[in-house]
Image (cartoon, rainbow, N blue to C red):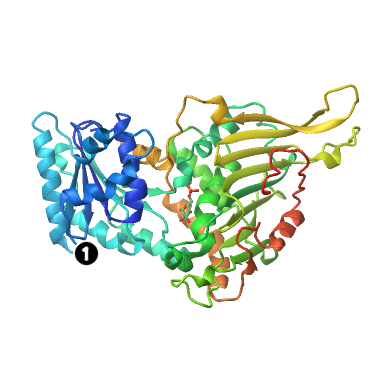
Amino acid sequence: SETGCLSIVVLGASGDLAKKKTFPALFNLYRQGFLQSNEVHIFGYARTKISDDDLRNRIRSYLEKGSAKSEEVSEFLQLIKYVSGSYDTEEGFRMLDKEISLHEEFRNSTEGSSRRLFYLALPPSVYPVVCRMIKLCCMNKSHLGGWTRIVVEKPFGKDLDSAEKLSNQIGELFEEPQLYRIDHYLGKELVQNLLVLRFANRFFLPLWNRDNIDNVQIVFREDFGTEGRGGYFDEYGIIRDIIQNHLLQVLCLVAMEKPVSLKPEHIRDEKVKVLQSVMPIKDEEVVLGQYNGYRDDPTVPDHSNTPTFATVVLRIHNERWEGVPFILKAGKALNSRKAEIRIQFKDVPGDIFRCKNQGRNEFVIRLQPSEAMYMKLTVKQPGLEMSTVQSELDLSYGQRYQQVTIPEAYERLILDTIRGDQQHFVRRDELRAAWEIFTPLLHRIDDGEFKPLPYQPGSRGPAEADELLERAGYMKYTSGSYDTEEGF
Ligand code: BG6
């Protein structure tokens, strides 16, 4: 059933996510030959009554970027058909099914299959009803074989209860193997590299534990505010927007034990164990911030208590990590755009070189921009003197892999949904465990019991966050190293 007719349905086809991420990712897959025009048809579905060409024209400018040729774009756009209808009545979905079936019948004169992928580029509030409509009207035709799969994206609820409710509603309609919960951080090159790095390298095996590692930071910074998304953002805040999903997923991959095999279920089993070992968050290990000017956005309430910055220390209660703080930090409107994992090792015992204040060993994995891994280490200062200096072993992807274009996260993840590989998607119990960690803190913030500190846009965030970092054991050195720039 893995060849033959494939129908990709983008629901919410005229929305932002579809235009900026979903269609461009589909286009890139098409250009690279992963979507064959004799097999694939793409359907856009939304409420607006527009023609096929109207939709194509709306998407075009998002595809004509980089090396894309305009004929390629036109060819691709011809694969897209538009169906308009509401999200909560059968009529539109019946029409959609008819269009998909027509396409399948046409193709199936040669080869039989009915593979149907539904990508919900929609607000989660309509997930349940849309899933019900799909189940009722649009399932794959079983006599042709194939499958029906549903792709959804966060926010999956606002807290543990609402997330469980959503999971139940969708779970009554579709089985877990049919559901693909996207966390696009899992599609990033260096996130996908984590397991290889950890489990295919003898270097790391003996070092990756509490005996050697002092602290771990997982950091997300953006140098712009919530422009244009204030309404959405204010409902959620930085913890739900970035930390509870993206950074926590990265934490799992850094901290998990070696899976039994690379089977998706084996990997996800290990991730769940990490999440279940996280201890309750302590108030004194949280710093929240809100940038000055955030409330000027007309879609943000004047007295909003929503954090646009947070540093949260998580503690994993298990044999490997007891006592090692995992510091998750995320912020909008900061001084730089960067996402990285920074692993700081303990001091060398018996320091005969007296090089302690030159900096500890660190292993840094920069997810973006400019993917890189580097190790900070102490070497002899070249020359006649016997003195030491901190230097780097550097693997910068831009230099090392000059001929390689690193795929967009969404490209890779959509390809996985077509291939049926769930490794890089969030399982239901994983989602639940993630909400369990953050829900108590989130409720206190929502109730106004925990207030964000103000910070200047373009700064490092509240100074209190750096103090927390220090208290957690992080030792900062900036002399002549890679990471001097805007700080990290
Ligand atoms: C999204 C958040 O999930 O991730 C946005 O909703 C954020 O607020 C974005 O800007 C960041 O993604 P990336 O891939 O640019 O780091």
Amino acid under disc 1: Asp
Q: Residue at x 64, y 69 (%)?
A: 453
Q: Quadrant of residue 372?
A: top right
Q: Position of residue 374 (x, y in %)?
A: 65, 33
Which residue lies at the image location 63% right of the left edge and 61% below the top edge?
281
Q: Residue at x 54, y 30 (%)?
A: 398
Vertical placement of residue 4 versus 282, above or below: above
Q: Quadrant of the N terminus?
A: top left
Vertical arrangement, residue 220 with respect to residue 30, above or below: below
Residue, disc 1 = 88
Between residues 60 and 164, which one lies in front from this camera angle?
60
Q: Is residue 4 above or below residue 317?
A: above
Q: Secondary structure at mark 1?
A: loop
- Give coordinates of residue 339: x percent, y percent: 57, 46
Q: Along the horizontal axis of the image, is 443 left or right of 354?
A: left
Which residue is found at the position 34% from the left and 64% from the top?
Answer: 125
The image quarter containing residue 458 is bottom right
Q: Is residue 234 visible?
A: yes
Dot 1 crowding, Cα within 10 Å, few <14, some 14–19, many 20+? some
Which residue is nearer to you in this view: 60 or 416?
60
Q: Quadrant of residue 126?
A: bottom left
Q: Position of residue 245 (x, y in %)?
A: 50, 53
Q: Is residue 176 visible?
A: no
Tell me residue 328's x, y (percent): 61, 53
In the visual, does 323 lie left or right of 42? right
* 170 on left or right of 356: left
* Residue 86 higher or lower than 408, as above or below: below
Residue projecting furthest to the top: 384
